Amino acid sequence: MSDTIKYLLPEERIPKAWYNIAADLPKPLAPVLHPGTGQPIGPDDLAPLFPMALIGQEVSTEREIEIPEPVRDVYKLWRPSPLYRARRLEKALDTPAKIYYKYEGVSPSGSHKPNTAVAQAFYNKEEGTKRLSTETGAGQWGSSLAFAGSLFGLPVEVYMVKISYNQKPYRRALMEAYGARCVASPSDETESGRAILAEHPDSNGSLGIAISEAVEVAAKNDDTKYSLGSVLNHVLMHQTVIGIEALEQMEMAGDQPDIIIGCAGGGSNFAGLTFPFIGRQLRQGGNMRIIAVEPAACPTLTMGTFAYDFGDTAHLTPLVKMHTLGSTFVPDGIHAGGLRYHGMSPIVSHLLELGLIEASAQHQTGCFEAGIKFARNEGIIPAPESTHAVKQAIDEALKCKAEGVGKTILFNLSGHGHFDMQAYTDYFAGKLEDHAHNQADLDKALSQLPGVAAE
């Protein structure tokens, strides 16, 4: 029996509940603070942006949150997603390591993002929302929410980071095919966008800027709510269908991972795969290594400060305690647009502070080289974001080879790169550069952190 068939689950094995890691944390998260008062926020403070069902999930400490049947019905379009063993890659690397990957590129939009987009669209529709606004970097989140909006009859407005808007026209076209309206950010449609353009007319944009625009639209329109593709607790929780399935699939394979890897920008696909495994380890013990991989050009976990900060550039959002490069930091225009965010999920940041996960930073040329090696052996072109996980997995496998130790590696291939082929064209043409973060810009951004005590 081939590995492809062996590690597929039947449709009835789609998880019936999301896993909430907050229930198993040895130390609770720091509270979210109101930017005006500095006091912990309540549900009413978030109501202009989110439906109450999602606000409840954001603060829940219940271990399991039931997945509504209408959401599970949509999940059946692509879930359970397959888990593969990368035998050809193992052979090419001549490593004693075993390499597995969970493949989320089988979703309609080609990434893990619909796992939460469908849930968010459902809850918004249930509570009477008429329109959704959001931001997107590389376009995977924007196209996923556009897809979900089309299923539940919700118009979607997407503010897409300008450099990705220009680099990735086919992702823009995909959003429009699903019925969404896509706007290059910063734009002249919002006060926050106009303020950025007044100071930096040629701005390439950032996720922080795009978030400001989308939040502003929701805050100023009573019929509109805001949807976020990563960072917040409820978003990461929706993604845990990935890891719940992977737990069962690894048991089917008769194996257990020693090392689990995911790329990390805001934290959603990383959390989706790893949180169920971390939760099991917290409850039952174990010594798995869990590695979050980020771009060296935007080294939030490896170089950022763990402090309270705004989630957006215009300071419209509440204050959350996270690893941050400063809300005004604008990373270089690497092709992994989905990883160009100044902050990291508070709960992922918390896990790093507790020593439960590790962080690694990779340069983009090495990641694209790893992506090509993976494609030429396993046949799948990874998204630029996902190549960071591929690169780390290859590094760990080669380390096993050097040490003569066979370990089991599991990583999340969070999306395919079919709409990112210009990035690969640029790589083959030698046009890609390895960007280190600009220390002067980072120091300036960090000097502007809000005056809130870190503890």
Image: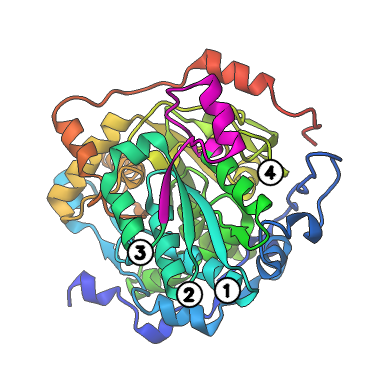
- Scheme by which the image is coloured: rainbow
Residue 152: mark = 2
* Residue type at tag 1: Lys
* Residue type at tag 2: Phe
Are there few (<14), some (14-19), or many (20+) residues within 10 Å of tag 4? Answer: many
Q: Earlier in the sequence, mark 2 or mark 1?
A: 1
Image quadrant holding the C terminus, namely top right
Are there few (<14), some (14-19), or many (20+) residues within 10 Å of tag 3? Answer: many
Q: CA distance from mark 2 to mark 1?
A: 7 Å
Residue 317: mark = 4
Q: Are marks 3 and 1 in contact (CB under 8 Å)?
A: no
SS class, disc 2 = helix
* Residue type at tag 3: Tyr
- Residue 185 magenta-highlighted: yes
Q: Nearer the viewer, mark 3 or mark 4?
A: 3
Mark 1 lies on residue = 125
Q: CA distance from mark 1 to mark 4?
A: 23 Å
333 up-or-down from 164: above or below: above
Relative horizontal placement of residue 154, taking residue 90 as reference (left or right): right
SS class, disc 1 = helix
Q: Nearer the viewer, mark 2 or mark 4?
A: 2
Q: Are marks 3 and 2 in contact (CB under 8 Å)?
A: no
Q: Earlier in the sequence, mark 2 or mark 4?
A: 2
SS class, disc 3 = loop
Task: Determine the residue positioned at 27% across, 30% down.
Answer: 365
Dividing the picture into quarters, in which one does residue 410 lie?
A: bottom left
* Residue type at tag 4: Thr
